[in-house]
Amino acid sequence: MNKQFFGLFLVSVLGFSACRSKHTDGVARPKLVVGIVVDQMRWDYLYRYYDRYGEGGFRRLLKKGYSCDNTMINYLPSFTAVGHTCVFTGSVPAFSGISGNDWVEQATGQRMYCTDDSTVKSVGAESPESKEGKMSPRNLLVSTVTDELMIASNFRSKVVGVSLKDRAAILPAGHSANAAFWMDDSTGHFITSNYYMPRLPGWVDSFNKKDEVRQLIRSGWKTLYPLGAYGESDTDDQLYEGKFKGDSTSAFPHNLDSSYKIGKASFRSTPFGNTITLDFAKAAIEGYQLGQGAFTDFLTINCASTDYVGHMFGINAIETEDTYLRLDQELAAFFSYLDEKVGKDGYTVFLTADHGAAHAITYMQNHDIPADFWNPQPMVENLNKVLEQKFQAPGLVDTCTNYQIDFSMKTIHEHNLDLEAIKKVALEFLRQQPGINYAIDLSKVGESPLPEPVRTMVMNGYYPRRSGPIQLILNSGWFEAHGKTGTTHGTWNPYDTHIPLLFMGWGIQHGNDHNAVYMTDIAPTVAALLHIQMPNGCVGKPIREVLKK
């Protein structure tokens, strides 16, 4: 080789190495970020069960990390897809377009699920046309902090999302993720779509072949401790508790094998859904070698069974307490795994929730606290009668979704009717109905008498193309009932919108505070930690107290 050429070559190589070194080593970042969203976790669960937690799970987060004790959701509705989106985008439905788990496209009247995508095919399901896998993040209109990490690393980072729920794996992982995996109930296997990959990696096939679901349900669900030890919960077998299919009682023990044979989705309503999720997360870390490369990787995890258990049994059931005590142990084991695999000082973890939950209606009524069920269907039927009599057109109200009234724009156009006139009559009717505190014309929400912070929450949640034009605010303690057991969420009230937020590990201070922060502040805080741009629809700000100076 010519000496002059060799000299130029050496300078070029050293220059490239220096640039690469500066890019990877000059900016301090953790090897791995793990974002854990515990579905339906109220903030007070940190302290309700505190005395029963071990040292390695929730207590470790509280003692070794930083807890933002006054973290609130600042939009409506407080539903799962919106929460996961907000955590990882720092955005609200008004910009993200994720206005609910489901919504009605206002222009066409089409019902849409948040991650539905007819252009993709299932990967790992029994058929490529299986609807369980025809999912992608394409309905999400903004970037995520995981997307921004990929951009910042020139797509050399690795991003993976894991959940039982498709939406809770897909939306956090973002548009540019290497993978998102969720469970197909019909097989008990983790699947994905060809948005991400043409076939499952070998490590996923190996995991699925273990058939862990059947192993976990084989012994049924017995309490972790003697039944009498569950002093933070109501007594067992309450009327407000749901039952597994095939069970004659809601009491422990639960014969999961028989319930699973009747309906495979029943597995989700057991604490073992969290077990398999965290086991799969460990397998993903091994499979993708997360935290082992030159660039920061990101793993998003949703522990979804806490949500299914809460919906089925309510938040005061022994089942709920037992689920959190088990999750505490599993988080401790997972953190120990990260300590060994990545190194105690090599990763940053944050834990939050997508929403909280209300006390069961019957539980509240048993204690003389105002609460009641709300069924929108009779209201919609009666409203349609009033509107038909006034405007001589049937079915002007299509549905009530996400506590919003959706009108049939097709019918309105066919009869050449005035939407403003229809809304005026509808609002007069709705404001007289039991359980409705406010009925608001969303196009005029700035003029409404709604007090803060609810008015801002309503505005933040309004995306005109996917939101009904009238927003309903129920009386406190009321919620939409799909039955008389369990509980739900979705309203502005603190029981639905006060969530835990804890950070721990690389770059994180120790401590806690009660300063008001919002779910929209999580993504920009992570972005600041990583020295990357915040997501492009972000409306939050970094929580400075969390980060080491």
Image (cartoon, rainbow, N blue to C red):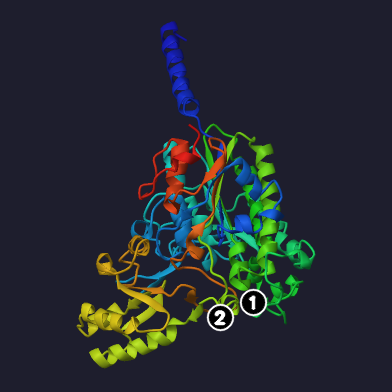
Quote the CA–CA distance across marks 2 and 1: 9 Å
The residue that disc 1 covers is 242
Q: Which mark is residue 425?
A: none
The residue that disc 2 covers is 483
Given residues 281 and 405, the one toward you in this image is 405
**Farthest residue in the top direction?**
3
Q: Residue at x 50, y 56 (%)?
A: 170
Q: Residue at x 41, y 7 (%)?
A: 4
Left or right? Give the position of 163 relative to 93: right
**Farthest residue in the front direction?**
368
Amino acid type shown at disc 1 = Gly
Given residues 209 and 478, the one toward you in this image is 478
Given residues 521 and 120, the one toward you in this image is 521
Residue 432 at x, y percent in the picture: 35, 84
Amino acid type shown at disc 2 = Gly
Q: Is residue 321 visible?
A: yes
The answer to which image quadrant residue 104 occupies is bottom left
Could you tell me which secondary element the residue under label 1 belongs to? Answer: loop
**Label 1 Cα neighbours within 10 Å, binned few <14 / some 14-19 / many ≥20:** many
Left or right? Give the position of 224 relative to 233: right
Left or right? Give the position of 393 relative to 193: left
Q: Is residue 190 above or below residue 201?
A: below
Given residues 491 and 475, the one toward you in this image is 475
Q: Is residue 219 visible?
A: no
Q: Are marks 2 and 1 in contact (CB under 8 Å)?
A: yes
